[in-house]
Amino acid sequence: MLGLNSRDFKLFIIVCIMALAAPILLNPFPTASAMGESFNAGYPALMQRFVIFGILVIGFNILFGLTGYLSFGHAAFLGVGSYAAVWMFKLLSYNVVPAIILSVIVAGLFSVVIGYVSLRRSGIYFSILTLAFAQMSYQLAYSVFTPLTNGETGLQVYNDDPQILMGENSPTVPHFFGLEMNAQSVVDVAGWSFTFQNGYYLSAVFLILAFYLSIRIFRSPMGLMLRAIKSNQTRMSYTGINTKPYMLAAFVISGMYAGLAGGLLAAMDPLTGAERMFWTASGEIVVMAILGGVGTLIGPVLGAGIIKYLENIVSKINDGILHNWFAFMPDWLDNALVTIIHPFIGKGWHLTLGLLFMAVVIFLPGGLVQGGQKLGGLFRRKKTDDAADGAKTPAE
Amino acid sequence: MDAFILQILNGLDKGSAYALIALGLTLIFGTLGVVNFAHGALFMIGAFCAVTVQKLLGLSFDVIDPTQTDFLGNPLKVAIPYVEAWFGPAIGGAIQDWSVPLAILVVIPVMFLVGWAMERGLIKHFYNRPHADQILVTFGLAIVIGEIIKAFFGANPIQTPAPEVFIGTVDVGAWLGMDPGSVAYPTWRMVYFFFSAIIIAAVFAFLQFTTFGMVVRAGMADRETVGLLGIDIDKRFTLMFGLAAAVAGMAGVMYTPILSPHYNIGMDFLVLSFVVVVVGGMGSLPGAVLAGFLLGILQSFASMNEVKALIPGIDQIIIYLVAIIILLTRPRGLMGRKGVMED
Amino acid sequence: MSKSNFSRRGVLKTGAIAGAGLAVPTYLRADGHAGFTNAPQGSTVKIGFNVPQTGPYAEEGLDELRAQELAVEHLNGMGDGGMMNTFSEKNLKGNGILGKKVEFVTGDTQTKSDVARASAQSMIQKDECIMINGGSSSGVAIAVQGLCQEAGVIFMAGLTHSNDTTGKDKKANGFRHFFNGYMSGAALGPVLEKEYGNERQAYHLTADYTWGWTQQESIAASTEALGWNTVQDVRTPVGAGDFSSYIAPILNSGADTLILNHYGGDMVNSLTQAIQFGLRDKQVNGKDFTIIVPLYSELMAAGAGSNIQGVFGSMNWNWQLQDEGTKAFVKSFGEKYGFPPSGAAHTCYVQTLLYADAVERAGTFNPCGVVEALEDFDFDGMGNGPTSYRGADHQCFKDVLVMKGTEAPTNQFDTLEIVEVTPRAQVEYAPDHPMFAGGDLGECNPGA
């Protein structure tokens, strides 16, 4: 269906459901409960980040997962896309459509230039070239290009900006032809409260489109070609195929995905800063991809979700909240548990992150997707064992 | 002219720091084929060895002095370091003053141990894994090490001054026959430069002139054949990892008086040292050293006001710009070997 | 419960009610209650402390957090009440705010605008905070201030020293207690004149971003008014680490004064390295070479060690002040944590109390009521002498401290000494002063 084989279609449907029902799925605990206050992630700002970074990493995966070329400067495209979008807000109006279109175009052009130059080298030399371009963009955006980027303060819309398409009654927040991004409806059901926000759904629709496109690319002849490049580029060249256009296409598509993500970030929250392009931001993209599972379809979305969850949820847990959880225990046990957990939460969330990377890379080289498959395999083997028992096939 | 000489000195000094870190990184990469993102963390552990030694020497007991009061109005507790109590204020003070050079003695065995533990405990399982996995696991390790350091020492930079005798400047101008005082350079930076030069020379001599070094070099070129000759190359590689860690650690210790160490210093040096290694050419020790000095000197010149007036912001991007230009003109960096890290 | 109750009609009815509930969602929940975002429900009110807990300013952020927790304790009637006893307004009675118990959530800004906004959004959207407090950099303060303006909650900025925070980036929902670059310049000027005379050649090293620029501009203006000459202003990359290539050219530039517009780790490194280059042992133009660090903090001073001895700078507040408010705060903070509070901690503590008091006076949590209560509000007893929030730009006006690195420290907290308390009149400026012009406060936004 939709040009997908049945397995891919199932995956696609799962992603659709996850994206559309996220406001419900991410609020598993009653809102006012201790668990809900700490672990619920179903509020718009975080859900937006889940899907936007999902788009970003899906795009990154088209380059890295298919071709094996590790770009260490992907955040630059995200940043450029955001700047383009905010400039559209400043010059035209708060309508997100021109902003998102321009951010994709600008990031695309930017990636054509960087890709054309960087793809002349491979391996770690390619990585360092992309890193160098991204760091240069960051440094310049932070300082010399301040008139264009507003430097450290970050580019934002001021009341005295031209906004030439802005009418009398135009909304003063980003909107989709009048549909304000930050408008939301809250539904209270029993102890739960679910927030459905326009901005989130716009991003979610883009995630679904981005995911669909990525499946099509993975299954296309071009995807096959890219994978062939990954396994042996020299052999491809010897067969007389010019691999360069394919590589550049993958790089640019990947850069445009990042531009789209940047544009959406700005559309959700019309401010952007240079630190979006810093090398750690690029590193984060790599980490998300590897954590989820490089080269798999769903891995990038999972990886992005987990990192953003840690960053936003674990970093907010403090000792007071811990004491709340353990309030039912005797004091000494409560204190002991809090002392043990203390280094890993709040200001120590980086430690949790670092340990998680290491654990995943050591034990699950294929990322979390592989973990899921292993788990699935465990159950399936049990099932087949049962079946085997039933059939009483003789042992070999 | 004097400004020019000063910037050359700065460049050599910066360059020696870059070269020393890049050297360790290349040693690990060249021998083990592992991309070690935790190398900056090793540098940081070295720096914090100096901090620890300084703190240990400063360990003190409290004497309550009723004549003075603290900020809450309670009698002031005066801290008296044990070393001063044992050896008297003069000798005790001198021992504390020399904590950074003393830390060199501590850092070598400590870093060998750290390197050994890291290689045996973690890295050895990653020899046959893709480079991306190596990068991620060592990156995770670097974060964990940084956080542990932060838990013990806080996030603020910690002052670790050089011994009193090395504070002040050396009149380099007078050596060169210029007006006295025209080119004054900090003594400790000169010490750092010569120290780095000695370490770099020692590493090269070790690889060049010892049997051990010869085996390691052979192993770098063709690990399998050396193994077939019945030589336990793994054990030697573990030692090499220890050596690389010790080099990084010593660089860290000696750099503390110039740059007050903090828990993120490893990450700050990480990207830079990778750029240096890659510009030098993956797997090439002389390349790493050459690239270190080249980038150090270019960065110093780019920081000059005259240059900045010509091209604003050039000092912020020079390293990356040079890296791009070199990689585009020389496919494998300055002295890289064909086929290394190209896939 | 008998089975007969479970009739088909009953099922339909409940279904219809549930359906209606889904079909008519409450558009922006708070709207239905009080007309502003996150109107407190029940017996508690929640505020958000958004401070850097990782990254270069983590120590400062943690100190802010300590002070904020202390403020919440005091508001809820625990502890000794601290500055609530010395505050000129007596509306706070230790029963929370408007009788509601104060709760708080914490977040990590990492000193990155994006992360800080994400954290603030989660406080507003998920935790339903009514006010955000804290932060340790101007970029972050401006970013979060803009967010709070859009969302309709009050933002009480923490440590932010750039002129822009209450200049071109000022917002109606944001308030700043901390002083700014202009005030540092105005306060330092007379002291520098007295100490170093009217004929100095100043060389600036400036962190290459907005805060650095505004401070450099302010200090250059005030020293040039004394007759000093600005030889050169060199911009240095943030986090450069090794500043040697920027310091070396100073040696023979003819300058006799170095002004370091750096903060945090950059300041510690550039000052240490400048001293290693022998700058302070030099004699230029027949004068002793001197170094000035316009913005000081205790944590930086501790990091720079003996290098700051005799170096002048300015501060918003210092624990060594001898007024009643300061003494009360230092006592409760010191007894709880074992060391004196930093200036950043003081600002965050005071801002929390000021917010609570403004709500009490307004009689509502509605941000517009709070804004009205805080605008042109005069108060005393909070450690800075008579203070007021100016309505035109939401900047606090109060005395500024000129500090000097202690020459012979007697204990580990004795790093800085107060040279002069510059009276408030001397650091005041017009709201449309060129360094602050171009912004638009806008209207207060209650959200919803």
Image: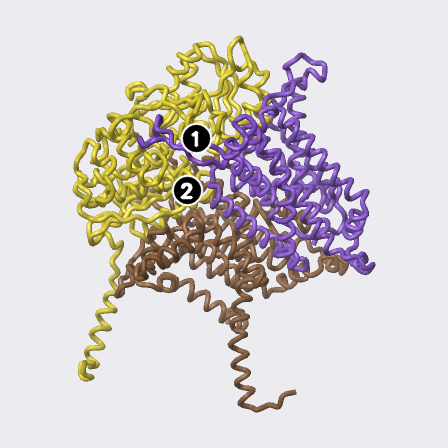
Chain colours: A brown, B purple, C yellow
Q: Nearer the viewer, residue C28 or A310?
A: A310
Task: Say which element carries label 1.
Answer: helix
Q: Nearer the viewer, residue A292 or C304?
A: C304
Q: Which residue is mark 1?
A: C211
Crowding at mark 1 (Cα within 10 Å: few <14, some 14-19, many 20+) = many
Residue B259 in the image: x percent, y percent? 56, 33
Residue A148 in the image: x percent, y percent? 48, 35
Check the picture and name the quadrant holding the C terminus of chain A: bottom right
Task: Report, in whole angstroms, how far the alpha carbon at label 1 lies from the one at label 2.
Answer: 17 Å
Question: Given the image, on which type of amino acid does mark 2 rest?
Answer: Pro
Identify which residue is drawn at 29% across, 20% down. C423
| Residue A40 location, quadrant | bottom left
Identify which residue is drawn at 71% across, 33% down. B197
Residue C396 in the image: x percent, y percent? 29, 29
The answer to whether residue A181 is left or right of residue A232 is left
- In this rendering, which labeled residue sits more in front, label 1 or label 2? 2
Would residue C436 be visible to someone looking at this image?
yes
A395 shown above or below C242 = below
Task: Say which element carries label 2.
Answer: loop
C160 shown above or below B30 = above
Q: Where residue C52 is drawn, which disc sits there?
A: 2
Question: Given the image, on which type of amino acid does mark 1 rest?
Answer: Trp
